[in-house]
Amino acid sequence: MLKVSMSIEIELENEKEAEKLYLSLKPDYSGVELELHGCKLVIKIGSLRPSRARALANSILRLIQLHEEIVNLTRHETLG
């Protein structure tokens, strides 16, 4: 059976934002390896069927996008 592994690296503005994202993803994705290196979050998806790996990556990337939108919204409201 074909298995796929992938690694996603996300570089955030600062270590505080990286840690917030790390802590928000950690409880929901226990089967995924998360590593925090300063401002960079590394997400490693293990050996899965291609469709499962893609679905998991899409789910994680969508949550990262939502996190960024919330950070930008709160930053805008704080400044405005």
Image (cartoon, rainbow, N blue to C red):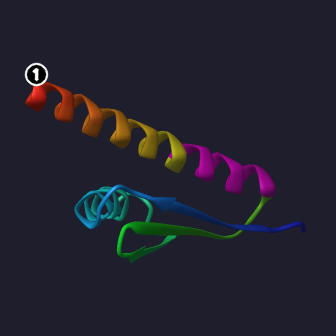
As drawn, the residue found furthest toward the top would be: 80
Tell me the quarter of the picture where residue 66 sits. top left
Give amino acid for label 1. Gly
Position of residue 79 in the picture relative to residue 20 (left or right) = left
As drawn, the residue found furthest toward the front would be: 79
Pick the front one: 27 or 35: 35
Residue at 44% over, 67% down: 41
Position of residue 43 in the picture relative to residue 3 (left or right) = left
Query: Is the residue 15 above or below the residue 53 in the image?
Result: below
Would you say the magenta stretch is mainly helix, strand or loop? helix
Tell me the quarter of the picture where residue 16 sits. bottom left
Quadrant that contains the N terminus: bottom right
Label 1 CA crowd tier, 10 Å (few <14, some 14–19, many 20+): few
Residue at 37% over, 58% down: 25
Pick the front one: 2 or 45: 45
- Please provide percent x and percent y for residue 40: 43, 68
Pick the front one: 19 or 31: 19
Residue at 34% over, 42% down: 67
- Please provide percent x and percent y for residue 14: 29, 61
Residue 20 covered by magenta stretch = no
Give the residue number, with chain letter if any, for mark 1: 80
Quadrant that contains the C terminus: top left
Span highlighted in magenta in the image: 50-59
- Please provide percent x and percent y for residue 61: 53, 46
- Please provide percent x and percent y for residue 8: 60, 62
